[in-house]
Amino acid sequence: MNTVMITGCSSGFGRETAEHFLSKGWSVVATMRTPREGVLPASDRLRLLPLDVTDRGSIAAAVEATGEIDALVNNAGIGWMGPLEGTPEETIRDLFETNTFGAMEMARAVVPQMRAHGSGTIVNVSSSTTLKPLPLLPIYTASKAAVNAFTECLALELEPFGIRTRLVLPGQAPGTRFATNARAKMAGAGGIPEAYRPLAERVFAAHAEAANREVTEPRDVVAAIWRAVTEPDCPLRLPAGADAVALAG
């Protein structure tokens, strides 16, 4: 039975991806900072493990507890919307620690066993914001653009060992908690600086308008991740959702 390890399964894309792999007969290791019973349907093929992707000790413990891993899905991430001028240094570092370095450390933890087995797949979940520059997202987009470059180089580096590396780029997904959490973090840091508020109002209005159009549903992201794991010949980059596909052109 194949085993997939998925980070960031407490909600959103991670949780729905875990449910999908369970429905397909996979053994699923669903990780989150604080595991909670009832987040996912009970199954003898499901394990919930604590994992903080910013903590190397936590990563090592979770990988060791999992054992053989056929696929890793680096989904854990945090969002942020705000101008550079109003973004605290701590927030900048937090975004890169989770979104960028977290994905790198997870990959580094599983590559040795995959290389020894001569097989495996690593899927990194990035963002369609890397396909089109947007205001109020310079830090978040930079953290995800680094994941893109990392994934593309890693794919070339690991291919000789039979390890596949793929990139999933979700579009805007108003139905998830991601954007809400990002706005909440911004408010907690003091909100938008006065000089940027007219711009912010236009950006937020555009996001609200986009929510009424055909955008990204969680099922789009799940389908892209499933394809990345199970289709050997799929492209390295997989945009997920109608808006992401349009941006990818």
Image (spheres, grey):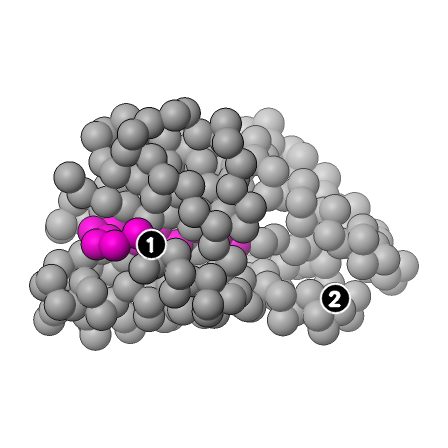
- In reply to whether residue 104 is colored magenta, the answer given is no
Residue placed at 72% from the left, 39% from the top? 205
Q: Quick one: 206 or 82, which is closer to the camera?
A: 82
Residue 129 seen from this side = no
- The answer to which quarter of the image holds residue 20 is top left
The residues bearing labels 2 and 1 have C-alpha atoms spaced at a distance of 37 Å
Residue 44, how many percent across, how many down? 29, 30
Residue placed at 74% from the left, 46% from the top? 184
Q: How many marks?
A: 2
Mark 2 or 1: the one toward you: 1
Residue 155, how many percent across, how many down? 23, 67
Q: Quick one: 102 or 195, which is closer to the camera?
A: 102
Residue type at mark 2 is: Thr
**Is label 2 in contact with label 1 (beta carbons under 8 Å)?**
no
Span shown in magenta: 65-77
Q: Report the residue marked by disc 1.
A: 65
Q: Quick one: 207 or 115, which is closer to the camera?
A: 115
- In reply to whether residue 68 is colored magenta, the answer given is yes
Residue type at mark 1 is: Ala
Q: Is residue 56 above or below residue 242?
A: below
Q: Report the residue marked by disc 2.
A: 87
Q: Secondary structure at mark 1?
A: helix
